[in-house]
Image: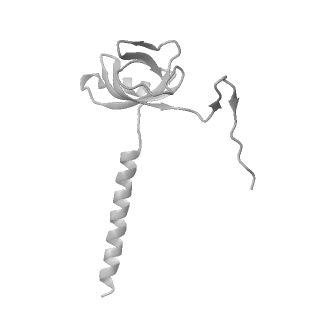
């Protein structure tokens, strides 16, 4: 009689572990660098992937509902044609993660996440630190 509850407990632990791993995989954002995207040779199958890097200074151009800019990992540059809602924090020299396809050496994207640092700036441009209280 005692064996049956032990099997149920073990089965419950296995199910909870399996569900936890699946949820973690769904909520984790994996992305390739620009160098990895070029080396994957995705231009033949239009597969959607995520690409991350920094927006190059001087590359931002917005016209006719499209935003074109260059993303770099420091070694490889890729031109991005973005059609979608631009996040408020988007600017040059900031980290972005884009989802889209590489077509003819241009990354076509419709989803963007902006990576930002924890530096806070006031409207006049001065920075400040958030100090923790001593307990």
Q: Residue at x 48, y 30 (%)?
A: 114
Q: Position of residue 116 (x, y in %)?
A: 54, 32
Query: On the picture, is 120 further left or further right than 91?
Result: right
The quadrant of the picture occupied by the N terminus is bottom left
Of residues 32 and 125, the one drawn nearer to the viewer in this rendering = 125
Image x and y of residue 63, in percent:
38, 11
- Residue 70 falls left or right of residue 109: right
Q: Residue at x 30, y 16 (%)?
A: 104
Residue 76 can be seen in this image: no
Horizontal relation, residue 125 to residue 23: left or right: right
For the point 58% across and 33% down, which residue is it?
117
Name the residue nearer the viewer: 32 or 82: 82
Residue 129 x %, y %: 70, 36
Quadrant occupied by the C terminus: bottom right
Q: Quadrant of residue 67?
A: top left
Q: Taking 3 as reference, is 25 above or below it?
A: above
Q: Residue furthest right?
A: 134
Q: Nearer the viewer, residue 92 or 39?
A: 92
């Amino acid at each position: 009689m005692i064996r049956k509850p032990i099997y149920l407990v073990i089965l419950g632990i296995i199910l909870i572990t399996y569900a936890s791993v699946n949820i973690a995989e769904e909520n984790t954002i994996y992305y390739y660098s620009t160098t990895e995207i070029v080396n994957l040779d995705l231009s033949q199958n239009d597969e959607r992937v995520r690409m991350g890097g920094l927006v190059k200074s001087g590359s931002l151009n917005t016209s006719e509902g499209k935003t074109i800019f260059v993303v770099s990992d420091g070694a490889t540059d890729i031109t991005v044609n973005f059609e979608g809602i631009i996040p408020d924090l988007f600017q040059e020299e900031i980290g972005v993660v884009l989802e889209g396809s590489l077509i003819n050496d241009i990354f076509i994207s419709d989803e963007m996440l902006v990576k930002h640092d924890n530096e806070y700036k006031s409207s006049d441009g001065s920075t400040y630190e958030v100090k923790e209280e001593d307990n």
